[in-house]
Image (cartoon, rainbow, N blue to C red):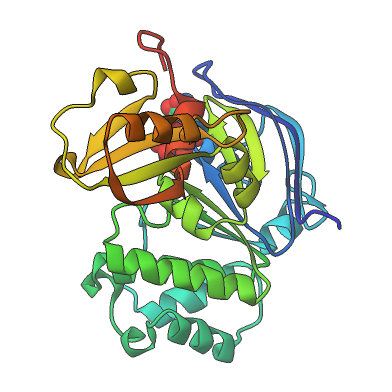
Amino acid sequence: MQPIISISNLTKTYKSGHQALKRVDLDIRKGEIFALLGPNGAGKTTMISIICGIVNPSSGTVTADGHDIVRDFRAARTKIGLVPQELHTDSFETVMATVTFSRGLFGKAPHPAHIEKILKDLSLWEKRNTKIQELSGGMKRRVMIAKALSHEPQILFLDEPTAGVDVELRRDMWGLVRELRESGVTIILTTHYIEEAEEMADRIGVITKGELILVEDKSVLMQKLGRKTLTLNLSEPMTTIPAELGEWALTLKADGNELEYVFDTNAERTGIPSLLRRMSDLGIAFKDLNTRQSSLEEIFVNLVHTPAGEAS
Ligand SMILES: Nc1ncnc2c1ncn2[C@@H]1O[C@H](COP(=O)(O)OP(=O)(O)OP(=O)(O)O)[C@@H](O)[C@H]1O
């Protein structure tokens, strides 16, 4: 299938000489939720800004639904909705006026039914005649999304959609993003919350220091790089881990009631049978045991880990 966004050999060096993107190649599939995950300053906003025509690339090409974002800027931009990181809205205007005006900026004919639908979907309908300056931060964020959707884009960029947002609104946003995907919109979100990528994304790209170091289906990524954690619920709590268990990297949790062992699912030997035998020899009994996939957080930390002393 033809990708909806195709990024090829994209490089950005700012005037300061800082290289924010280094030869990035990436195809975004139509209808997916793609999470661009990376620490502060990794180049996420730069990448989005280039695709949206706000920042010029130093080299490389990007097409959005077949339109080159530089040569065919207008056509490309019409396909795209952007919810920027910073909230900047015309605060004296009403919600309705702002969102309607946004649509007009793209040269699209008025479509009150569409505006009504997005305001209703975003729970903003009741607030349509309220001035934006009177809205809460969460509502303002919803207005930003409504603006970005006003011209019926096929691609939606969300730059850190839930930064500084409370848990409830974050859940709402996630629900909303899923609904948008259901309606056929392709979504690219940037985040440094691993939890968000894990919860939302179909695919994940990890970017660090301007390099896209990995792009993978979320499930494959978690399986391939994932480790598992075995938790043993001990019959009797323990104060220290016996030296005889020293060859396994164990951690004592839950006030000494649980022993945790992280193992590599891809390794030839997990070390579990021998650990259980040794525990049995030592007379250490357990009531229950379970394993869980290590979180993306653990994987991510390993991937972007910068050795101490190295400048980031
Ligand atoms: N206009 C600019 N001029 C010079 N350097 C810039 C400019 N904009 C961004 N940078 C630098 O480029 C790098 C990438 O910044 P960018 O905003 O793309 O990162 P990010 O991954 O979005 O980070 P964050 O998660 O903090 O938003 C940073 O080191 C930043 O300081």
User: What residue is shown at x 25% (from left), y 69% (from top)?
Assistant: 133
Report which quarter residue 154 is drawn in.
bottom right
Percent x, y for residue 81?
Answer: 58, 62
Percent x, y for residue 96?
Answer: 42, 82
In this orientation, which residue lies closer to the viewer: 214 or 75?
A: 214
In this orientation, which residue lies closer to the viewer: 199 or 58?
A: 199
What is the residue that sits farthest to the top in this orientation? 309
299 left or right of 127 in image: right
In this orientation, which residue lies closer to the viewer: 32 or 96?
A: 32
* 7 to 198, vertically: above or below: above
Percent x, y for residue 69?
Answer: 73, 47
| Residue 151 showing in the rendered view | no
* 212 to 158, vertically: above or below: above
User: What residue is shown at x 57% (from left), y 27% (from top)?
Assistant: 210
| Picture quarter with the N terminus | bottom right
Percent x, y for residue 169?
Answer: 32, 68
28 left or right of 13 in image: right
* 32 to 223, vertically: above or below: below
User: What residue is shown at x 55% (from left), y 89% (from top)?
Assistant: 112
261 left or right of 66 in image: left
Number of marks: 0
In this orientation, which residue lies closer to the viewer: 2 or 219?
A: 219
User: What residue is shown at x 55% (from left), y 75% (from top)?
Assistant: 179
Report which quarter residue 33 is drawn in.
bottom right
| Residue 281 showing in the rendered view | yes
| Picture quarter with the C terminus | top left
